[in-house]
Amino acid sequence: MLNRKLSYSVLMYTSGLLSAFGLLLAALFQNQLWMILCVVLFLRWVGAIRYPIYSQLSNNIIPSHVRATTISLLSILDSLFDLVIFLLLIAFALEGIQGILFGGAVIALIGSALPIQQREKLPSSPINR
């Protein structure tokens, strides 16, 4: 439904910026439990929107004859980047929960600024043997 009006790239950038904004709000209003609860639910909603869009972008970009291998390698890289991000958040954790939330907002903002490359879906051709 959302893709009818907006492109995948616009949806990914917008949802990333909304995530960063939600984390920033949580950091600013950390003493109000209802605000934190609303932000957590909001982030789950944004994640529910982002996952299918990311899957469709991956399917459009990665050719079908190497898709399984490429997705496996991307999963390994994803785990490595998770480790790097968690190590970066340790530096923010010195400030407590507010520091972690600000750090998460900064990381989400950096991730939202990364370019998304799209290519038109090419007709699949049989693999040459």
Image: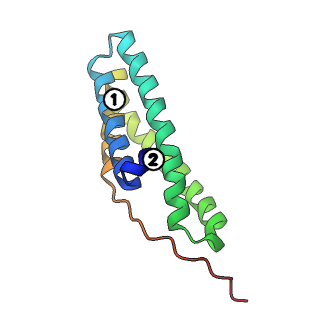
Classify 53 as above or below 100.
below
In the rendered image, residue 46, in percent from the top left (x then y), is placed at: 44, 35
Mark 2–mark 1 distance (CA, rounded to whole Å): 22 Å
Classify 74 as above or below 30.
below
Whether the residues at callouts 2 and 1 have beta carbons within 8 Å, the answer is no
For the residue marked with disc 2, what is the amino acid?
A: Val
Residue that lies at the very extreme toward the right in this rendered image: 129
State the SS at label 2.
helix
State the SS at label 1.
helix
| Mark 2, other Cα within 10 Å: few <14 / some 14–19 / many ≥20 | few
Relative to 10, 128 lies left or right: right
**Residue shown at the point (29%, 16%) measured from the top left:** 29
Colouring mode (rainbow / by chain / secondary structure / one colour): rainbow
Residue nearer the viewer, 120 or 27: 120
Residue that lies at the very extreme toward the left in this rendered image: 28
The answer, for residue 96, to whether it is visible in the render is no
Relative to 101, 73 lies left or right: right
For the residue marked with disc 1, what is the amino acid?
A: Gly
**Residue with the mark numbered 1:** 22
The answer, for residue 124, to whether it is visible in the render is yes
Classify 75 as above or below 50.
below
In the rendered image, residue 64, in percent from the top left (x then y), is placed at: 62, 70
Q: Quadrant of residue 18?
A: top left
**Residue with the mark numbered 2:** 84
Q: Quadrant of residue 126?
A: bottom right
Q: Earlier in the sequence, mark 2 or mark 1?
A: 1
In the rendered image, residue 42, in percent from the top left (x then y), is placed at: 42, 27
The mark total stands at 2
The image's mark for residue 76 is none
**Residue shown at the point (46%, 39%) measured from the top left:** 86
